[in-house]
Image: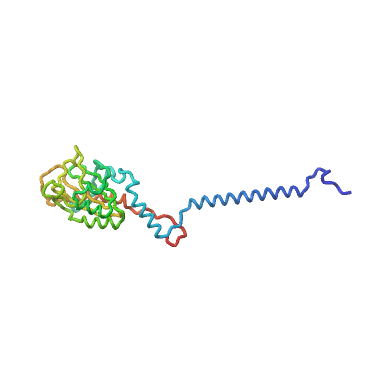
């Protein structure tokens, strides 16, 4: 006599297998969905693939926008280290010195903060967007320098402007009239500070391009000492140059340093 599985209380084997199969399918589908979701997240997080030309465009954009993105105090730090050459000191090692910032001027247009109308015309011709300026003194408050940055639309425009403003390192005006000064940045004078007594009759003035930025600087005596050519004082000449160049080069590096290249794994342009 054949036993009745239902009468004996044993569940049908087909129903158990069916439920297990359904649960397995649900589990597999769930894992597949999880994998697909995770893949999508990873794809979003992974760097895009850029061609070499696209990389250059991104890097150029990053450099060109730094003057707007960085705080003024980062572009012009409160203290800047510079060195006086050991050859000037006739010593075995150079002398480490510090320049102190005494003020940052408000951002301005491209015509008011340069010494001559010719300089303003050069900047406007090459598409200048803004001028940034800050003034520094040495630790003894004997020398003062203003470093200015003209923001140009491209590297080529900055280079053209720099060539147009090229001049000897040592320049001199017959008196304090700014219209007789060489083309370049106008020193910011702050009342009650060393810069208020800046002697325009003897100054070091120069400019150079770095990326889309034209960096200009002027340096001179801050204490209204007698009008003697700065070149006749070897130490003063060397420290003025070191002070001005040290600040200018740090500002230029902050603004125009090459950024890290965008990641583009697998791209033939990388």
Task: Say whether residue 258 is visible.
Answer: yes
* Residue 88 location (% of width, % of height): 18, 52
Q: How many marks?
A: 0
Task: Say whether residue 239 is visible.
Answer: no
* Residue 152 location (% of width, % of height): 29, 53
Q: Residue at x 46, y 53 (%)?
A: 47
Q: Quadrant for residue 59, please give it.
A: bottom left
Pick whichever, 171 or 186, lies toward us: 186
Q: Residue at x 21, y 40 (%)?
A: 190
Q: Is residue 103 left or right of residue 221?
A: right
Hey, which residue is sitting farthest bottom in the picture?
Answer: 268
Q: Is residue 52 left or right of residue 230?
A: right
Hey, which residue is sitting farthest right in the picture?
Answer: 1
* Residue 179 location (% of width, % of height): 15, 49
Hey, which residue is sitting farthest top in the picture?
Answer: 192
* Residue 203 location (% of width, % of height): 16, 49
Q: Quadrant for residue 159, please give it.
A: bottom left
Q: Is residue 170 left or right of residue 62?
A: left
Q: Quadrant for residue 187, please give it.
A: top left
Q: In this view, does 64 lie to the left or right of 237?
A: right
Quadrant occupied by the C terminus: bottom left
Q: Residue at x 84, y 46 (%)?
A: 4
Pick whichever, 79 or 201, lies toward us: 201
Pick whichever, 182 or 41, lies toward us: 182
Colour option used: rainbow
């Amino acid at each position: 006599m054949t036993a009745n599985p239902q009468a004996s209380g044993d569940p049908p084997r087909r129903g158990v297998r069916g439920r297990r199969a359904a649960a397995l399918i649900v589990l597999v589908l769930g894992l597949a969905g999880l994998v697909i979701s995770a893949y999508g997240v990873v794809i979003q997080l992974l760097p895009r693939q850029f061609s070499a030309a696209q990389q250059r465009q991104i890097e150029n954009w990053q450099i060109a926008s730094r003057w707007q993105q960085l705080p003024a105090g980062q572009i012009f730090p409160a203290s800047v280290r510079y060195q006086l050459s050991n050859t000037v000191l006739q010593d075995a090692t150079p002398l480490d010195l510090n320049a102190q910032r005494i003020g940052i001027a408000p951002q301005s247009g491209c015509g008011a903060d340069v010494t001559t109308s010719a300089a303003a015309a050069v900047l406007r011709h090459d598409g200048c967007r803004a001028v940034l300026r800050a003034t520094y003194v040495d630790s003894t408050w004997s020398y003062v320098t203003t470093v200015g940055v003209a923001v140009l639309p491209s590297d080529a425009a900055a280079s053209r402007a720099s060539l147009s403003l090229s001049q000897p390192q040592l320049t001199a005006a017959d008196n304090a009239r700014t219209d007789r000064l060489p083309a370049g940045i106008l020193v910011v004078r702050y009342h009650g500070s060393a810069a208020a007594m800046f002697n325009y009759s003897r100054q070091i003035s120069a400019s150079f391009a770095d990326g889309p930025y034209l960096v200009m600087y002027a340096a001179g005596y801050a204490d209204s000492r007698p009008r003697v050519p700065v070149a006749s004082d070897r130490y003063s000449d060397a420290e003025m140059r070191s002070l001005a160049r040290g600040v200018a080069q740090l500002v230029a590096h902050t603004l125009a340093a090459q950024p890290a290249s965008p990641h583009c794994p697998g791209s033939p342009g990388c």
